[in-house]
Amino acid sequence: MYKYILRRVLVFIPMLLIVTVVVFTLASLAPGDPLTGQTLDPNIDPEVLEERREAMGLNDPPHIQYWNWLTEVSQGNLGDSLHYSGRTVEELIISRVPNTIYLAVFSLFITISVGLPIGIYSARKQYTVVDYTATTFGFFGLSMPNFFFALIAIYFFSFQLGWFPPRGTVSSTSLTGFESFIDRLHHLILPGITLGLSSTAIYMRYIRSEVLDVMGSDYIRTARAKGLTERSVLYKHTLRNSLIPIITLMGFEFGTLLSGAVIVESVFSFPGMGQLFLVGIENQDFPLIMGINLIVGVTILAGNLLADILYAVVDPRIRYD
Amino acid sequence: MRQKSIWYLLIAMLTFGLILAACGGDPEEFEEEEGGDMDDDPIEEDDDAADDDEDADNGEDGEGADEGDDNGEAGEPQDGGNVNVAMYSAPDHQFNPIYYQSSYDNNILEFMFERLYGQDEDLEFYNILAEDYELNDDQTELTVTVRDDVEWHDGEPFTAADVEFTYTAIADPDYLGVRQSYADDLLGYEEFNSGETDEFEGVEATDEHEVVFRWEEPTVTPEYETGFPIIPEHIFGEMGVDEIEDAPESSEAGQIVGTGPFQLTEYVEGDQYVLEANENYWQGEPHLDTVTWQVVDQAVMTGLLQSGDIHGVFEPDGIVPADLEDVEELGNVNLYQPQDLGYQYMGFKLAHRPSQDVEDGVHDTDNYEPNEKLQDVELRQAIAYALDREGMVEGLLHGSGQVLHAPFPEASWAYDEDAPVRYEQDLDQARELLEEAGYEDVTGDGYVEDPDGEELVLNLEYPTGNEARERAALVIDENLEEVGINVNVAQPREFSAHADRVEYDEPEMDMYLMGWSLASGDPDPANYFESHAPYNYTRWVDEESDQLISDATSAPDAFEMEYREEVYADWAEHVSTELPMVFLWSMVNNFAYTDDFGGVTENPVNMYNDTHEWYIAE
């Protein structure tokens, strides 16, 4: 097992390198640079911009720029942002990580706590009103665009009912302790639900079909024949065997945890990694783009590894020796 | 056993996340504010909207209300409270005037830093930190007496040395920013900037409250050039100029020191920024306790104004044209709609630089390679006549704009209604001009050929990012087709890609869409119209234009405002006749603020003047 993990981790390194090369190539192929946007103001002398380019190393050939970046990274330094003057990439990423994690974890919580029970229930009561309702809800959740749902949620729950704040992460900077925690949670609810909506629907559909599948298998019939209670059949035998695809999904989800959610973040003014990444791309801030990519890459690989390990935990037939 | 462990794992993961969330709360203890308005119950203030029906005419008083102050809605100024103002993007957190680049950073800076001069609603200069000034006869030396009753936020006195320090920093060889244009005409800039001398002759504090600016050449815009926000020497003086960019005093709440009426005390990055009143402000303690900037998505702006969560939205955003009608119907909102100084245009690439010059970054008019397709002025005029610019403003901008005839918008003193040739849409006139110049449809394909009988196809390129401009490209195509001009509209490019092609004179480009955002200081168009200027993207080479532009700023005639007005009128006429570009429109800004938000000074170039007079009615 440990050998397996070690092997996987070692494979990460060349994979990450390839990812960074691809991202860097794409970024350097794109025309323009972080300073192009400033050519809108005729009071800025083009020579000054040229000097800035030189100073930032933007005039170096791409492979040199990549090498410089790689050397910095190997020393544990993600470099200075080109767009955010005077700030480092680490600093920027760290400032966005907490929000991103709150949002991702909260929406994952909603996904699991709503998606799984409904899915299981509707599998057990297949072709009943409950099942049909859940299925309808599932299609609704899948087909509803995030942006649209966000606006509707803000309209009803904030503007009409006044239950939740329409924007932001805190209502005041002066709250502390438990109050601050509740306040943050309060601000998380609408964006969290919006973000979790479609994956809730996906999880629900998956677990439903998986449970149905497993319930029809021989070992469940055997279990029932042994006279086990329905409860025990469901929780001990069916559920555990139905979890494999969910673990795969969660592996991916965990991986994209840090990459943020651009649309939800901007509609709710909930600053996270998604927005930061977008700013990086819009302004061709390649150290920022590369830095975020690197970190997201690591979490995706780690998420997949975690999922693989969990397979072995859930299903004894899977072994990594 | 096994199935239990997986659930434990799941639960552990979730709780871990929540604990993280809890710990991440506010790291700093901060005393409760009585600001009251920052509560999270958005519905509470909703009744404002209802009882203001009689004020439904607010939409109209926009342009007329020049005095701005006291629109009467909010009654007498009151002390205390908080105002929430909105911006659509987060600042970059470079809160130092000499280094900031984003206009969202400027939103914060305007409350904290002050200049020697400000501009009023007619764009006339008035004293802020300056008490008095004297210009010598040949306009090369300006002696400014600065106020002696001003203190920095940390209690240190503001002096003339701070002014000298600010300008010296901008001129410094180590300076990494882009604001050189304020200092580079001053005497001895080259020597100082290249490191030849340590003394910058251009600015000198002659005593504690007197500073002298000296120019190389006579200047016609002394107040503009000396009107840069002043930064404190006692904070930054010890640092290298290149270190100022990264210094915590340039970005951290509570550490930024200015002279303005408010101070940034708290922020949640990308979410909200709290500015607290400066009790010792020299113009008197501000009415408000706090001003809170909130980052807001455009899509919910109208709702937030209605619910009273947001009290105002000003520069650089305002209400987007598409939401204007909804906001007008709210009833609890004042609109102020000044014309923006920037504008959108369609440029004709009259010449291209040879690729060698592009590579070397050279702008030598002798090397320009004229674009044969566009040399006939009649063709360019015909194009102008063919365009339905009124229609673009109405249809694409929802009326939030104004057709422009010369690069001086109405707000500018150089604006002269009668000077430029106005090209109202007139298809017959366009066809006639084409015919006179020899453009006829020889092949019978519905499109005109050039006077030599060659096929004429004009390539139009445009960028994404500005919806009205994107759609204008298609209107232009259609308009020109009506008079038989064949336009090949390229797929829109992402802005920076487009900007590169314009700047580097892409050989196949004939026409392009672009915009200028212009500073308010002075209408001098030299930077982007002089033949050899890099920003003269049309590569229009015209001696008469160059002459007029230089006359307008040449001593001694240009010391007289009236003379400059005349020259600019002549120039506007010349440009609009020669038409190196068709001016499309200038936007109208839709600034909005709620009825209970008073003391706002309506000003077309800066809504953040005299913020110490802002107040909120309970």
Image (cartoon, rainbow, N blue to C red):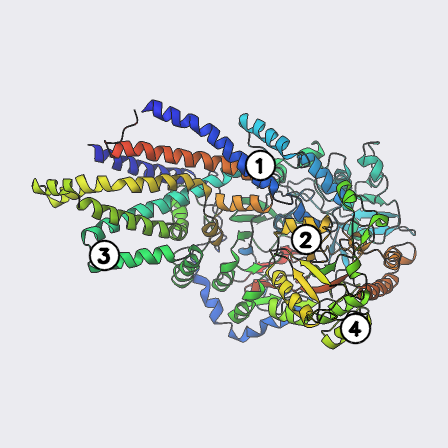
Which is more toward the observer, B563 or B567?
A: B567
Looking at this rendering, what residue extends furthest in the bottom direction? B428
Q: Amino acid at mark 4?
A: Glu
Cβ–Cβ below 8 Å for labels 3 and 1?
no
B504 vs B558: above or below: above
Look at 17% across and 39% down and name the residue there. Answer: A236
Indicate the amino acid at tag 2. Answer: Gln
CA distance separating discs 1 and 4:
56 Å
Determine whether label 4 and label 3 are within 8 Å by CB: no
Q: Which residue lies most toward the front here?
A: B443
Q: Quadrant of the N terminus of chain B?
A: top left
Three-letter code for the amino acid on which mark 3 is drawn: Asp
Q: Mark 2 falls within which chain? A: B
Circle 1 or circle 2, nearest the eye: 1
Seen from the viewer's position, the closer of residues A75 and B261 is A75
> Same chain for marks 4 and 3?
no
Q: Nearer the viewer, mark 4 or mark 3?
A: 4
Judge by depth and name the residue closer to the eye, A173 or A234. A234
The location of residue A312, given as percent across then percent down, is 28, 31
Near mark 4 (Cα within 10 A), the count class, few <14, some 14-19 or many ≥20, is: some
Q: Chain of mark 4?
A: B
Is residue A127 at least partly visible in the picture?
Answer: yes
The residue where tag 1 is placed is: A287
* Residue A131, label in figure: 3
Disc 3: host chain: A
Three-letter amino acid code of the residue under disc 1 = Pro
Crowding near the residue tagged with mark 2, few <14, some 14–19, many ≥20 C-alpha atoms within 10 Å: some
Q: Nearer the viewer, mark 2 or mark 4?
A: 4
Q: Please provide percent x and percent y for residue B272.
A: 52, 49
Compared to A2, does B27 lie above or below?
below
